Amino acid sequence: MTIPNLITIGRLIIVPLVIVMILQERWGLAFALFVIAGVSDGIDGFIARRFDMRSELGSYIDPLADKALLVSIYVTLSIIGVLPGWLAIVVVSRDVMILAAVVLSWLMARPLQIRPLTISKINTFAQLGFAALVLAASAFRIEIGLLEDVGMVVVAVLTVASAGAYMGMWLRHMGDK
C-alpha cells in the first residue's frame, strides 16, 4: 500500500461525507470537503509521479474516486433541486456508457484499455469546477445567475463530446480485426 493509494482511499471515504453535508444543507462543510478531495487528488498524483509510487491499484482507484465524487455530487444536487435532473443524467450516462463498453469488450474477449483523452481531462476539469462553483455559491450565499446557466451548458457539451470521443474509440477498437 503506497501513500498515494492511502490518500485516494481517504478521498473515497470523503465522498459519502460530502453527500451527507449536501443533504443536510451544510454547504460550508460540503464545499470544504469537496476542496479537500480535489486537493488530495492533486497531491496523490504528484507524490505517485515524483516519488515513483505509481501502482496498478492506484491506476484503478484514482479514477474510481474521481467518478464517485463527481457522479455522487451531480446526482445529489439534482435530487435536492439545486441542479436540473437532465444535467445529472448527462454526467452519469457518460460514465455508464464507458463502463458498459469496457465490460462488453471484455465479455467479447476484445478487452479495451481506456486511456484518458484530452477531451476527457477537460471535461473532468469542467465538471469539478462547476461543482465547486455551485457548492461555493451555496456555502457563501452568492447568486451566480447567468454563470450557472453557462456552466451547465459547458459541462453538458463537454460531457457529450467526451462520451462521443470514447464511443468512437470503442467502435474503432471493436471494428478492428
Image (cartoon, grey):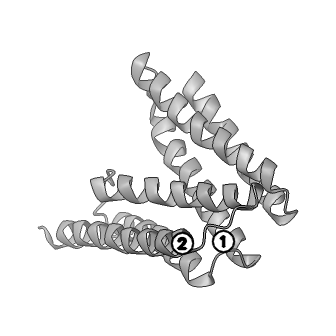
Residue 82 in picture, x, y percent from top left = 70, 74
Type of amino acid at the residue the image marks with label 2:
Val
Residue 45 in picture, x, y percent from top left = 47, 31
Which label is found at residue 111? none
Answer with the quarter of the image where residue 19 lies.
bottom right
Q: What residue is disc 1 on?
A: 75
For the residues labelled 1 and 2, say whether their Cβ atoms are less than 8 Å apart.
Answer: yes
Q: Which residue is drawn at 45% across and 66% down?
A: 99
Q: Which residue is drawn at 76% across and 61% down?
A: 141
Q: Residue at x 32, y 71 (%)?
A: 161
Residue 171 in picture, x, y percent from top left = 23, 73
Answer with the quarter of the image where residue 52 lies.
top left
Q: Which of 118 and 6 is in front in this view?
A: 118
Quarter of the image with the C terminus is bottom left
Type of amino acid at the residue the image marks with label 1:
Val
Determine whether 48 is above or below 63 in the image: above
Q: What residue is disc 2 on?
A: 92
Q: Is residue 121 left or right of residue 142?
A: left
